[in-house]
Image (cartoon, helix red, strand yellow):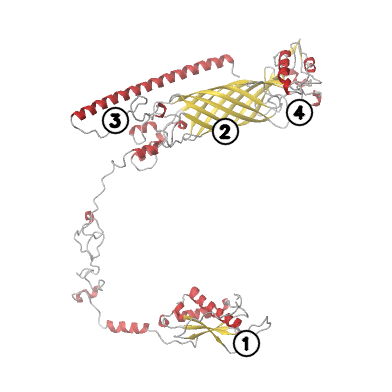
């Protein structure tokens, strides 16, 4: 534990250091302000001389200093930006060596983002109230105090890491008694358990452990030493309408560990229990008597906290149950969350206020974990450290403030405020194209090309076959090389007998007469209009016939045979023919104009008579009545769907 003398000396040195840094920072601000005023004075003098000479001053010179009383907008001191712009060469001094390549690439416009600057660390001292929340009530509004320190480093504009330590003492006392015998509550520190003798005080050469049998008013004194590592999330440094934060708000979370010792004041100066004092108090069930009961208890106790409270003896890690003089120190891992704020005094100093709740997974911080009826209490103990802090930013000359004080939009707004780029880039080349051939003059080898002539990539008019006649004048731009010497004035040359060969080819393309004698038919199951996959070869035969270039003008009627009488069978025959046409068009690529859907009353085979109900045992002869035929019909037409009920199922 830190001794009080050592803490006092440390605090004095810390305050001296903070005052020194503040003074240096203040001197630097004064010097900067003085230089800004001198620059303004010189600018005004130059402006006056320019007016005398008849020169027009386009722009008034603005003051970089703040609060000098001039008209117009004045930048507040905390809103100033004392660092070089990311486009300035001086900014490279603010960048870590391993990031300088990135900054060079950014300056040369080879990379879109600047390198992050070197930022300062924050060193702080914390002082505040320590409050334990447990089974025994804390004593008063400020039951104890803690002192500590922290070191914090940013890892980006929103997140930083902080290491902290704290040592403190807190007190608690109950104004209500537990009335059952203590031996029934299993609290070994109050029922004379001999295991606690080695940790308790001696009276007249004898070590005494409190041994109560009756009413007990619990109290405690706890000493805490903690070490934590926290993540800190900044909540308000992204500013769209303001360059700097005067206040910083943040949330914290993290893990740590503590060692603690809890003692009780349950014996008087002679080593006797406070039995008479406790039994003599009346009205401890009434809230209105709480103040008087506390006063009576404080007057009756000696305030020495001589007795060890119940402790863990589990040797938890390396700190558990270690002795410090006559007392037991217990170690427990912890988790914590909290909120805080800070106000900037200068670029080097700020003052903070924070409250942090620590969860211990332990129920002996207040020395008691038993209810009045002898069972373990329900909740674990926690403690809250609410503190003020004095914080100093530590860093060299070429460093910026900790990034939680910086606005990440500085770079973006700075880029928007600057004149459009790019003065350091070469001028835009002249891309004039005088002859309009699509090739700029600076690349054009023939600057006066004719507008109706195609050109190559160098702007020269094309003569593809090399016959000396430009393509735009050539009747045969692709004359075979062996005929170039036989071209006419139009650049055309034809081989002998070429017309006979062309005539034969044209005649071969003329369509032949329609022939449906070899075309198949498609059969269907009873009351079905879906085409079975077994008939795809037949469909392919029809498709090949129609897709042949010789048959490009042939039309076929897709004729559905009406199997029986009545409107139902007519609709079913039409749906079968229409389904066959759709498959030929969509799956086999047949021109739909070559197919016409029709129906006809066909011959009846095998005693068929249409669909009049479910039949069994129908053979191939009856299947012929349920068919679609392909017939030549140059003058045919698509028959509309007959009137009648919906017929059949799309089954295969």
Which numbered disc flags the more N-terminal residue, 3 or 1? 3
Quadrant position of the C terminus in the picture? bottom right
Q: CA distance from mark 2 to mark 3?
A: 48 Å
Picture quarter containing residue 70? top left
Find out whether the residues at labels 4 and 2 contact each other: C-beta distance under 8 Å.
no
On screen, residue 201 above or below 180: above
Q: Is residue 277 left or right of residue 545?
A: right
Task: Give whichever of 226, 633 is nearer the camera.
Answer: 633
Q: Secondary structure at mark 1?
A: helix
Tell us which disc is closer to us: 1 or 4: 4
Q: Which residue is mark 1?
A: 621
Q: CA distance from mark 1 to mark 2?
A: 87 Å
Q: CA distance from mark 3 to mark 1?
A: 107 Å
Q: Which residue is mark 2?
A: 253
Q: Which residue is mark 3?
A: 61
Q: Position of residue 339 (x, y in %)?
A: 56, 31
Tell us which disc is closer to us: 2 or 3: 3
Q: Which residue is mark 4?
A: 371
Q: Residue at x 65, y 89 (%)?
A: 607
Q: Is residue 538 left or right of residue 212?
A: left
Q: Residue at x 25, y 71 (%)?
A: 477
Q: CA distance from mark 1 to mark 4?
A: 98 Å
On screen, residue 588 above or below 138: below
Q: CA distance from mark 4 to mark 2?
A: 32 Å
Q: Position of residue 453 (x, y in %)?
A: 23, 65
Residue ranking furthest to the top = 204
Which numbered disc flags the more N-terminal residue, 2 or 3? 3
Which numbered disc flags the more N-terminal residue, 4 or 2? 2
């Amino acid at each position: 534990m830190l001794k009080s003398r050592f803490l006092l000396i440390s605090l004095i040195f810390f305050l001296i250091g903070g005052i020194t840094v503040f003074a240096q920072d203040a001197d630097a601000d004064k010097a900067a302000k003085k230089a800004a005023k001198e620059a303004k004075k010189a600018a005004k003098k130059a402006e006056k001389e320019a007016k005398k000479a008849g020169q027009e001053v386009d722009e008034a010179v603005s003051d970089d200093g703040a609060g000098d009383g001039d008209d117009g907008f004045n930048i507040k001191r905390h809103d100033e930006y004392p660092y070089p712009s990311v486009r300035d060469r001086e900014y490279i001094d603010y960048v870590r060596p391993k990031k300088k390549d990135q900054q060079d690439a950014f300056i040369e416009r080879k990379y879109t983002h600047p390198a992050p600057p070197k930022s300062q660390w924050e060193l702080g001292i914390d002082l505040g109230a320590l409050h334990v929340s447990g089974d025994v009530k804390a004593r008063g509004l400020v039951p104890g105090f803690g002192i500590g320190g922290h070191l914090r480093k940013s890892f980006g504009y929103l997140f930083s890491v902080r290491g902290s330590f704290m040592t403190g003492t807190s007190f608690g006392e109950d104004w209500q008694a537990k009335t059952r015998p203590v031996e029934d509550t299993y609290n070994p520190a109050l029922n004379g358990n001999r295991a606690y003798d080695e940790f308790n005080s001696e009276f007249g050469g004898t070590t005494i452990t409190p041994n109560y049998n009756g009413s007990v008013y619990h109290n405690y004194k706890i000493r805490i030493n903690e070490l934590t590592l926290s993540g800190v999330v900044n909540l308000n440094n992204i500013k769209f309408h303001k360059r700097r934060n005067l206040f910083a708000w943040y949330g914290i979370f993290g893990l740590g560990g503590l060692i603690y010792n809890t003692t009780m004041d349950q014996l008087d100066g002679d080593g006797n229990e406070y039995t008479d004092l406790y039994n003599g108090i009346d009205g401890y069930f009434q809230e209105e008597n709480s103040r008087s009961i506390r006063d009576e208890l404080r007057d009756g106790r000696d305030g020495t906290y001589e007795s060890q409270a119940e402790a863990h003896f589990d040797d938890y890690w390396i700190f558990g149950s270690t002795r410090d003089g006559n007392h037991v120190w217990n170690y427990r891992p912890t988790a914590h969350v909290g909120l805080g704020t800070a106000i900037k005094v200068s670029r080097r100093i700020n003052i903070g206020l924070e409250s942090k709740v620590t969860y211990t997974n332990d129920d002996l911080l207040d020395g008691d974990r038993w209810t009045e009826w002898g069972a373990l209490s329900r909740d674990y103990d926690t403690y809250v450290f609410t503190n003020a802090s004095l914080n100093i930013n530590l860093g060299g000359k070429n460093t910026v403030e900790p990034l939680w004080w910086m606005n990440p939009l500085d770079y973006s707004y700075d880029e928007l405020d600057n004149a459009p780029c790019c003065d350091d880039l070469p001028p835009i080349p002249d891309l004039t194209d005088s002859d309009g051939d699509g090739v700029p003059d600076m690349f054009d080898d023939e600057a006066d090309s004719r507008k109706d002539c195609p050109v190559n990539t160098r702007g020269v008019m094309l003569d593809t076959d090399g016959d000396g006649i430009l393509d735009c004048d050539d009747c045969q731009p692709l004359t075979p090389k062996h005929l170039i010497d036989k071209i006419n004035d139009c650049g055309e040359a034809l081989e002998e007998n070429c017309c006979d060969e062309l005539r034969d080819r044209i005649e071969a393309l003329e369509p032949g007469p329609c022939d449906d004698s070899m075309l198949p038919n498609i059969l269907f199951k009873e009351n079905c209009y879906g085409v079975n996959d077994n008939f795809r070869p037949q469909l392919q035969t029809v498709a090949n016939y129609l897709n042949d270039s010789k048959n490009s003008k042939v039309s076929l009627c897709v004729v559905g045979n009406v199997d029986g009488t009545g409107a139902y069978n007519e609709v079913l025959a039409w749906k079968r023919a229409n389904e066959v046409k759709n498959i030929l068009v969509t799956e086999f690529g047949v021109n739909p104009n070559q197919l016409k859907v029709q129906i006809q009353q066909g011959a009846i085979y095998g005693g068929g008579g249409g669909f009049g109900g479910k039949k069994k045992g129908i053979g191939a002869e009856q299947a012929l009545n349920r068919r679609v035929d392909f017939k030549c019909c140059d003058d045919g037409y698509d028959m509309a769907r007959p009137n009648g009920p919906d017929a059949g199922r799309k089954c295969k």
